[in-house]
Each structure stands twice: as structure tokens, then as C-alpha cells.
Amino acid sequence: PLSHQWFYSAVAGEVEMEVPMVGANAATLILDNVTPSQSGTYRVRVANATSPEGVFSQPAILTVLPDAPADGAVIAWGSSATVPAAAQ
């Protein structure tokens, strides 16, 4: 079986720190009620018995704006996201 561990990376002052997210060990990461403080880079490490050190996904950058839509809709995720016409 595969194991998953999500990591969050943000800049604190001039130092970028990547830390494992407590309890974030599913194949999919769901973030509810996000705030601007959760802006940063997210990636997952996937491991199994053959490769216990695992491999990392490409990073996904999340930016949460202070004036984000009240419904919490994700407008863009990743480097090739398409912004819905209603959000433009």
C-alpha cells in the first residue's frame, strides 16, 4: 500500500521552512475555510515498502487573497490553472 504525507512550505522572515502537515496523510489534501496565512507551497510525499523514503510531487502554490470570494471558491491552482469567466 501507498502512504502519503503532505508538506507545507512558507516563508517566515527570510527563511523558507517546509514542515509535514499533522494528520494530512491522504492521497487528496482538502483545506477548508482557508485564510491568507495558509498561502504557500504544498506537496505530497508518496512512499511504499519498496521505497520507504518516498518521492515528492511537484509543488503546488496556493495564494489566498484577503478579498477572496465569500463562497471560498478556488480561482486558480497551480501554474496552468484556468480562471473561470465568472471570476474575471
Image: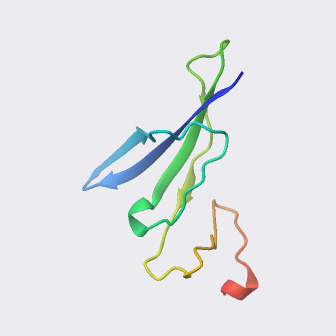
Please tell me whether residue 86 is drawn above or below residue 75 in the rendered image: below
Colour scheme of the picture: rainbow
Looking at this view, is 48 or 33 the one in front?
33
Instruction: Name the side, left or right, on which 85 lies relative to 39.
Output: right
Q: Quadrant of the C terminus?
A: bottom right
Position in image of residue 10 (x %, y %): 39, 52
User: Residue at position x 45%, y 62% from top?
Assistant: 39
Looking at this view, is 88 or 37 the one in front?
37
Asked where in the image residue 73 lies, by quadrant, the reply is: bottom right
User: Residue at position x 54%, y 82% from top?
Assistant: 70
Position in image of residue 85 (x %, y %): 75, 85
Position in image of residue 80 (x %, y %): 70, 63
Looking at this view, is 4 or 78 the one in front?
4
Outermost residue, left side: 13
Q: How many marks?
A: 0
Instruction: Name the side, left or right, on which 78 lies relative to 85.
Output: left
Looking at this view, is 82 or 67 the one in front?
67
Outermost residue, top side: 50
Q: Quadrant of the N terminus?
A: top right
Please tell me whether residue 5 is drawn above or below residue 47 in the rendered image: below
Position in image of residue 52 (x %, y %): 59, 16
Please tell me whether residue 10 is drawn above or below residue 19 in the rendered image: below
User: Residue at position x 47%, y 75% from top?
Assistant: 65
Please tell me whether residue 16 is drawn above or below residue 75 in the rendered image: above
